Amino acid sequence: MSDEEKMEVISSPISTADVDHLAERVFQECINMLGGLRRLTYYRNLTWLPSLAEAAYAVVLKGELFKTNREIAKELGISEQTVKNILQADEKEVERFIMGEVEKVDEHKAGGIAKLAYKRVKKEKGIFIKEEELDVLGIAWALIVLVRLKGADFPLDREELKTRLKGTTIKGVPAEEIIKKMKFPVKSPAEVLRQIRELTK
């Protein structure tokens, strides 16, 4: 057994609920580092976003709850090797990558981005962003949509999207009303965000 696996957690600095909030905040900071949500909506392919979300959670679980790679892998449903890749990612190399175009993010790059984002978030006075604050920034709807789209198989038809976004409101408009005006099938999460953004201007 490795030293890491022998490590015992005496107490957790934050609660599980706070971990979720912090991971969401780190994910948002990742988006900011990549040029912001508006820039991301122009990419044709955002299939790497789940990897970025996994990396944000992995970094937070390690940094706040001191979980082992094995524990993180089990909790997130990914391999221990993926967790290792995330946590050992070279942040300096990723900083250079961020300066260029973002077309593909594997666990190495996602891990580096998440680690940089985590450090930035921890330096801030207010670690957590409340949903109301996200609304003010105009990005809460996009985060909700991305979460609801997790695990979806693309291309996506109208009925599947309606099921996934059922009960949500986007910029004060029921998602069902917006979906009625969208063109289908949609080929990627980026296309979903792009169409919604265009229809709610």
Image (cartoon, helix red, strand yellow):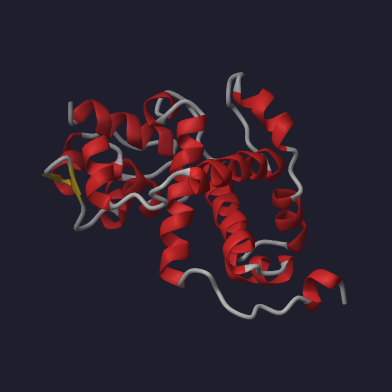
| Residue at image location 42% in from the left, 51% down from the top | 127
* Quadrant of the rendered image containing residue 158: top left
Q: Is residue 12 above or below residue 189?
A: below
Q: Is residue 7 above or below residue 37?
A: below
Q: Position of residue 103 (x, y in %)?
A: 59, 27
Judging depth in this view, the residue of 156 and 169 nearest the camera is 169
Q: Position of residue 123 (x, y in %)?
A: 51, 44
Work out which quarter of the rendered image holds the C terminus and state it: top left
Q: Image check: 172 left or right of 185?
A: left
Judging depth in this view, the residue of 125 and 176 nearest the camera is 125
Q: Is residue 105 above or below residue 169?
A: above
| Residue at image location 39% in from the left, 31% down from the top | 37
Q: Image check: 43 left or right of 174?
A: right
| Residue at image location 74% in from the left, 43% down from the top | 89
Q: Given the current orientation, which residue lies at the most extreme front position?
A: 125
Work out which quarter of the rendered image holds the N terminus and state it: bottom right
Q: Position of residue 48 (x, y in %)?
A: 57, 41
Q: Given the current orientation, which residue lies at the most extreme right position?
A: 1
* Quadrant of the rendered image containing residue 70: bottom right
Q: Image check: 16 left or right of 186?
A: right
Tally of numbered tags? 0
Judging depth in this view, the residue of 90 and 161 nearest the camera is 90
| Whether residue 93 is visible | yes
Q: Position of residue 187 (x, y in %)?
A: 43, 35
Q: Given the current orientation, which residue lies at the most extreme top position?
A: 100
| Whether residue 151 is visible | no
| Residue at image location 75% in from the left, 38% down from the top | 90
